[in-house]
Amino acid sequence: MEKHNSKYRWLVFGAVLFTYFLIVSQRTAPGLITDQLMKEFGVTAAAIGLLTSIQFFAYASLQVPIGILSDRFGPNVFLIAGTLLNGIGTLLFSFAANEYILFAARMLVGIGDATIWINVVIILGRWFKVNEFVKLLGFAGMSGSFGFLLATVPFSIWISIWGWRIPFLAVGIILTILAILLYFILILQPSRMGIEPKKPKGKKEPSEKTANILKRIFSDRQAWATFLCHFGVVGTYVGFIGSWAVPYGMEMYDLTRSESSQLVMIGLIGAIIGAPLMSFISGRIGSIKRPYLFAHIIVVLGWAVFLVFQGKPPYPLLIVLFLVMGYGNGASTLTFAIVRKSFDIRDVGVVSGFANTGGFLSAVLLPFIFGKVLDTFEAGYQYGFIIPVIFSLIGLMGAGLIKDKEREFIKG
């Protein structure tokens, strides 16, 4: 029996998406307790920014290697191992007695997280037919947005009731158990059922040398366009909500932790709307570049508004700005539409990893630099928003570099 025709593939779909949903929630959940960590461990804003950056550094630095290894050796083992590492790191975070353990814990979480998205994409591609895969990839992106949503008001309320350690402990336990379940769902049970992947026709080509793959990708204008696009809209947003968004609302607008996390939730609603809407618009007009360019422009303007109002726009406008930032992040799914339409199937994993590297490189840089600005200037937020403005301008430059293969897009 082939995977593409098996009803079992829907169990795989559900398990993989639930894993992605839960792991994504832990990317930004520590941002809810930034002030508590600073008080409990006696660390500076820059140190907290570095804590977030370490996690995203591990993620970003491993994207290309994971893409190459997953293409060659299969995605199942990497997804299971990544889930387990994420669970162990989250457990360690909940038990942390000092800042060094905090850093080690978030490093483990980042390493585990690095394996997830690329392998989710590859697994869905192997279990589902092409026309099913394109539709379900949108649902995968939405599950990530719902994961971010979990790490706002729901997680904030949980923290308010039980303190910050118990929620992270519970999630760590669930992720560890989930890693074991994934072994049965992805490897053991399919083997017992005799479900085999659809084998490609013809002889299997020998593996290309890694150096040749990297040389080809790094010299490709379209690959760099996806890298810069993701740098501009993903990392700026994820880096900010994962570290300083909640403290920003509490300090600048005297909001409670729960109220401030609602701002992040508004942004995530924008992301949930943005992903399917931008894909729909792209399909209707037969172009990826034009709608993506528009998304980058509104993101740049959105971050610039924070500067115009010296870091404190009127509250109703603030709500709109978070919605716009989230919408831009949701539009980032177009990055992978570009990859799919522009590159040979053998390079999709590597280029996807390269694009993801761009997104999370800015997520590494923004929290730490933003924290240094807050430590240096009394009116830190007034100057801090210069950083996402510059980063989003880099993303806009990437959108301008996209070569829009409209005919191919229409056919796809």
Image: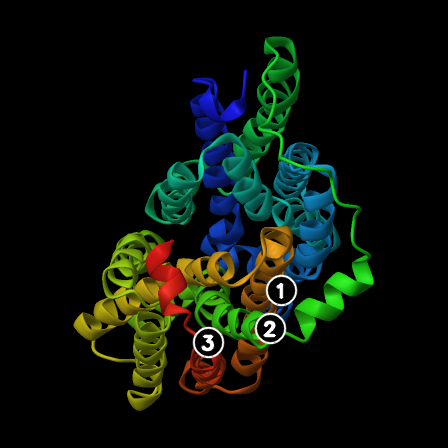
* Mark 1 or mark 2, earlier in chain: 1
User: Which residue extends farthest front?
Assistant: 202
Q: Which residue is mark 3?
A: 402
Residue 181 position (above or below residue 39):
above
Q: Position of residue 3 (x, y in %)?
A: 53, 24
Q: Position of residue 78 (x, y in %)?
A: 68, 38
Q: How is the image coloured?
A: rainbow
Amino acid at the residue labelled 3: Ile
Q: Is residue 254 visible?
A: no
Q: Is residue 59 visible?
A: yes
Q: Residue at x 58, y 70 (%)?
A: 223
Q: Secondary structure at mark 2?
A: helix
Q: Position of residue 222 (x, y in %)?
A: 54, 72
The reply to whether callout 3 and callout 1 are in contact (CB within 8 Å) is no
Q: CA distance from mark 3 to mark 1?
A: 28 Å
Q: Residue at x 45, y 21 (%)?
A: 5
Give the mark toward the camera: 3 or 1.
3
* Mark 3 or mark 2, earlier in chain: 2
Mark identifier at residue 238: none
